[in-house]
Amino acid sequence: MSQKSYNRSDRVAQLVHHTIAEILVKHPEKKYFPSVTITEVKLSNDLSHAKVFFTTLDESLSKTIEKQLNHDAGFFRYLSAPQMNLRIVPQLLFIYDTTSVYGQKLSSLIDLAVTSDISKHKEDN
């Protein structure tokens, strides 16, 4: 008997990710939808709650968009229920994903250190 490479919560998380991303594309009447990208979905062990991580093109609007997405969580559950074909559709909690911001800051620090190192070596020569 072959064993599946990942567990049910991973498969359901992938399904939630795909379904929410599809809703964002299919419903442009919500003005913030085009600027939102779903980055990850984490499910509770009992599959009843999902943390949906997202990024947005305009970081300054992240808190506003997070608040609006959480306000519209019922809308997402309603539209996704028929597509997901699950006995229980998870409660959704949208969270702004700060990993890209952190990565950009880290990258700029590395660039600054490299530039500083290059200028020091030029002064020494």
Image (cartoon, rainbow, N blue to C red):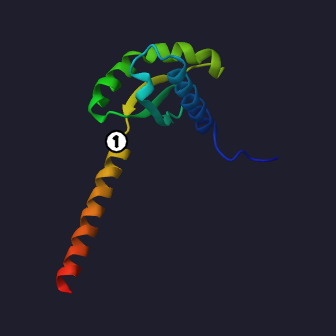
Q: Does 39 sit left or right of 125 as displayed?
A: right
77 in relation to 120, above or below: above
* Residue 40 placement, left or right of 109: right
Image position, residue 49 (x, y; %): 48, 27
Q: Nearer the viewer, residue 48 or 5?
A: 5
Which of the 4 quarters of the picture holds residue 18? top right
Residue 28 percent location from the top left of the image: 48, 17
Residue farthest along the right direction in this orientation: 1
Across and down, in percent, residue 53 comes to 43, 34
Q: Residue at x 55, y 14 (%)?
A: 79
Image quadrant for the C terminus?
bottom left
| Residue 22 placement (x, y as % from top left) | 56, 25
Q: Residue at x 60, y 30 (%)?
A: 15
Residue annotated with mark 1: 98
Amino acid found under the numbered disc labelled 1: Thr
Q: Is residue 84 above or below residue 55?
A: above
- Would residue 30 appear left or right of 89 to someone viewing this image? left
